[in-house]
């Protein structure tokens, strides 16, 4: 036997069984939150320090010109952008309601690690940008629509998203929301370790 053995990278396990099981946990978990409820939560001034809330503007940049000099939300200024149809990104939301905290606990027990999740909130629009342009991540994402429908592009394929299902977006997958004509709230869950 040759004293030199070439090192080989072990095969990468297929992530789909893990992601499908996680998606089943997420899909079966009820989150009771409607537009009135999320707007009420956004009025908790000290829960939303800058940059925990951002608006996706027409140039696909994150806008945050609705915070006071101490870095806390000016709700009425943000609400005007919401009413105009701009999509908002709410960061790190797994503590927001008892339903989300319960889901966070289920995912902790399944994954063995903390979970980061964001929400995308929109009053609906046919004029404004629905989300960011196609992009990808170096981690897996599961999207749970809480209310409303929207249209996604995932690796060039169009998919409708509504509260009856979840979307699994494996790492490296190009994706974006391409249409958001009605009010929606979606939970995007980072499934990295």
Image: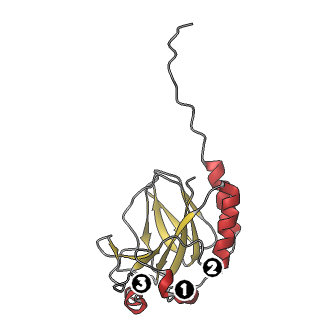
Kindly identify which residue carries mark 2: 97
For the residues labelled 1 and 2, say whether their Cβ atoms are less than 8 Å apart: yes
Judge the density around disc 1: few (<14), some (14-19), many (≥20) Cα neighbours within 10 Å.
Answer: some
Instruction: From the viewer's perspective, tell me whether residue 170 is left or right of residue 66.
Output: right
- Residue furthest to the left in view is 59
Cα separation, mark 1 vs mark 2, equals: 9 Å
In-front residue for pair 157/22: 22
Occupied quadrant, residue 31? bottom right
Question: Is there any visible trace of residue 24 in the rendered image?
Answer: no
Mark seen at residue 72 = 3
Cα separation, mark 3 vs mark 2, equals: 20 Å
**Where residue 162 sits: x, y (%)?**
58, 72
Q: Earlier in the sequence, mark 3 or mark 2?
A: 3
Measuring 50% from the left and 51% from the top, which residue is drawn there? 171
Measuring 51% from the left and 87% from the top, which residue is drawn there? 44
Cα separation, mark 3 vs mark 1, equals: 14 Å
Q: Earlier in the sequence, mark 3 or mark 1?
A: 1
Kindly identify which residue carries mark 1: 41
SS of the residue under disc 1: helix
The colour scheme is secondary structure
């Amino acid at each position: 036997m040759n004293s030199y053995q070439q090192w080989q990278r072990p095969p990468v396990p297929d992530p789909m069984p893990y992601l499908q099981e996680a998606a089943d946990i997420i899909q079966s978990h009820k989150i009771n939150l409607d537009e009135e409820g999320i707007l009420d939560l956004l009025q908790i001034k000290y829960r939303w320090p800058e940059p925990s809330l951002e608006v996706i503007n027409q140039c696909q940049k994150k806008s945050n010109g609705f915070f006071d000099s101490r870095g806390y939300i000016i709700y009425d200024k943000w609400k005007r952008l919401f009413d105009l149809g701009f999509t908002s990104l709410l960061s790190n939301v797994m503590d927001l309601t008892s339903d989300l905290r319960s889901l966070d606990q289920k995912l902790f027990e399944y994954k063995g690690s903390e979970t980061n999740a964001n929400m995308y909130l929109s009053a609906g629009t046919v004029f404004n940008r629905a989300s960011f342009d196609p992009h990808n991540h170096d981690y897996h994402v599961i999207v749970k629509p809480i209310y409303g429908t929207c249209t996604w592009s995932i690796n060039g394929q169009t998919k409708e998203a509504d509260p009856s299902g979840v979307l699994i977006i494996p790492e490296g997958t190009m994706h974006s929301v391409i249409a958001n004509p009605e009010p929606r709230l979606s939970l995007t869950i980072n499934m990295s370790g």
